[in-house]
Amino acid sequence: MFTRFFLPHLKALSDRYGGLGMHCCATARHQWENMKKIPNLKILNLTRGLEETEEGIVYFADHCVQIHDGMPGDKPTSWYLEHAPSARVVIRPWAEDRAAAQRFVDQLRPYCDQKR
């Protein structure tokens, strides 16, 4: 159904606007292969819990930028390097206070200058 009813329209939108960003909160693991068929998929937002999000990061690592909900802000940055080193991920951390935010920034800093 995805390839017949949705993919042609998503392709048309992507062609018209030079790319597409997509949010998916459905249980759609079975459609991930089809999502990769969307031309110029620039950014993807999956929101189906931590386990599926982690799988998605790995699956789409070489395909598009990802910005997911449900990732804890204190998730070690090393997780991305270990499981999906080529992934381009927007991290939206939450911190209780300025000190916690500074600790998170300090944790990220060594990874920001790495050439991959």
Image (spheres, rainbow, N blue to C red):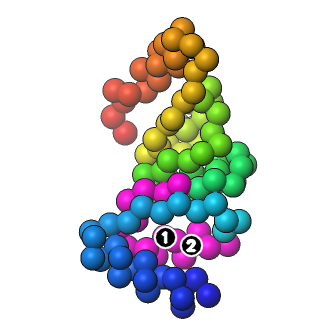
Residue 52: x percent and y percent? 69, 54
Of 43 and 58, the residue lying toward us: 43
Residues marked 2 and 1 touching at CB (< 8 Å): yes
**Residue 33: mark in rendering:** 2
Type of amino acid under label 1 = Lys
Image: magenta residue range: 29-45
Question: Which residue is drawn at the image coordinates 43% and 56% (left, top)?
Answer: 43
Q: Is residue 42 something one can see in this rendering?
A: yes
Farthest bottom residue in view: 4
Residue 93: x percent and y percent? 54, 30
Residue to which mark 1 is pinned: 36
Tell me the element at label 1: loop
Of 58 and 46, the residue lying toward us: 46
Residue 70: x percent and y percent? 65, 43
Question: Which residue is drawn at the image coordinates 39% and 79% (left, top)?
Answer: 11
Q: Is residue 86 something one can see in this rendering?
A: no
Q: Is residue 16 above or below residue 59?
A: below
Image quadrant in which the C terminus is located: top left
Q: Is residue 36 above or below residue 83?
A: below
Farthest top residue in view: 99
How many badges with numbers are in the image? 2
Tell me the element at label 2: helix
Locate residue 39: give its quadrant.
bottom left
Of 29 and 47, the residue lying toward us: 47
Residue 67: x percent and y percent? 50, 47
